[in-house]
Image: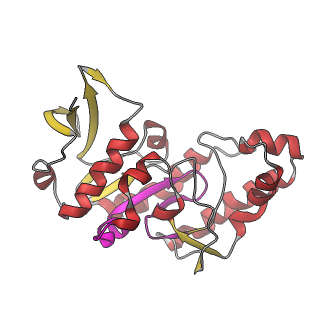
Amino acid sequence: MKILFSPSESKNQTKGSENVGNFIFPNLNDKRKFVLEIYEKYINSLNIDELSQFFGLKDKNLINHYKSSFKEKNGIKAILRYNGVAYKSLDYENLENKHYIDENVLIFSNLFGIIKANDILPDYKLKQGAKLPNLNIEKFYKDNFSSSLDEYLKDNEILDLRASFYERFYTIKKPFFTLKFIKNGKVVSHYAKYYRGLILKEMAKNNIESVDEFKNININELILSEIQEIKNKQEFIFEIKN
C-alpha cells in the first residue's frame, strides 16, 4: 500500500541535523536541481516588496530566512517538516509505527517534487500554484517523474489522499482508491485535511496493507457509508458522526 499525500503551506522551521538529500528517485536529482536553480535565480532577482508578495509574508526576517533556507545542508524528515492540519492530525511524533509512514507515504512538494515521508528536507517556501519564469513546475515534474513513479507503484495498491491540485504532478494509471467526507448529506471540504490525517494515523496503527484491510478500519468519528466506483477509482465515502 502506497499513500499519496499533499504538503502543507505551514512548516516546522527547525533546522535539523540530518543531511539533506538522498531523495527517492536519485537518478532524477538533476531535475530537482534544475527547478531549484530557477527558483534561486528568481527569488534573488526580487526586491523585498516583491519577495513579500511571492512568499506571502510581511516579516522581513522570515523573508530573508526563506531566501536561503532551501539551500541548507541539514534538515528534518519531510513528514516532520510539514505541520499543517493533516500533519497535526496524523501526529507522527507520537506514532509507534513510524516505519509505516516512512516507507509508504509519498508527499508532493511544490518545490522538490515527489518525496518520501522520511526524505530529509530543508525549510523552504513556495506556495501552491506559485509561478516561476518560463517553468510550469507541475508539468515539469509530471513529465520527468511519471515513468519512475509508475514503476515504483506498479506492484502496490494506492490510496490517493492528495488535494486535487496535486493531480497536476502525477496521474495515476492503475486502480486506486480515495476518500470523501460528508456531513448531513453535504461534502465537507474544510475539515477534509483533518480527517485525511486521522485516517492515515489509524492506517499506521493497524498496519493497513490492502484495500480489503482498509474496509475494516474503525474510526470513532467516521462511518463508512458507501463505496463508489468511477473508472479506475474507488471512492470511499465516510459520514462524519454528529
Residue at the image point whose x is 56% and y is 45% from the top: 139
- Quadrant showing the C terminus: top left
Left or right of 225, for residue 83: right
Q: Nearer the viewer, residue 138 or 218?
A: 218
Left or right: where does residue 222 sit relative to residue 167? left
Q: Which residues are magenta?
A: 95-120
In the displayed structure, 223 sits above or below 71; it is: above
Please provide percent x and percent y for residue 80: 49, 64
- Where residue 100 appears, as percent x and y from the top left, is 29, 68
| Residue at the far top in the pictured view | 185
In the image, is residue 9 above or below residue 116?
above
Q: Nearer the viewer, residue 35 or 239?
A: 239
Which one is in front, 59 or 217? 59
Question: Image quadrant for the N terminus?
Answer: bottom left
Residue 86 visible in the shown view = yes
Q: Is residue 155 visible?
A: no
What residue do we see at 26% from left, 25% from top? 183
Give the percent coordinates (x, y) of residue 64: 81, 57
Inspect the magenta stretch and tell me whether residue 93 lies in it.
Answer: no
Give yes or no for residue 118 being in the magenta stretch.
Answer: yes
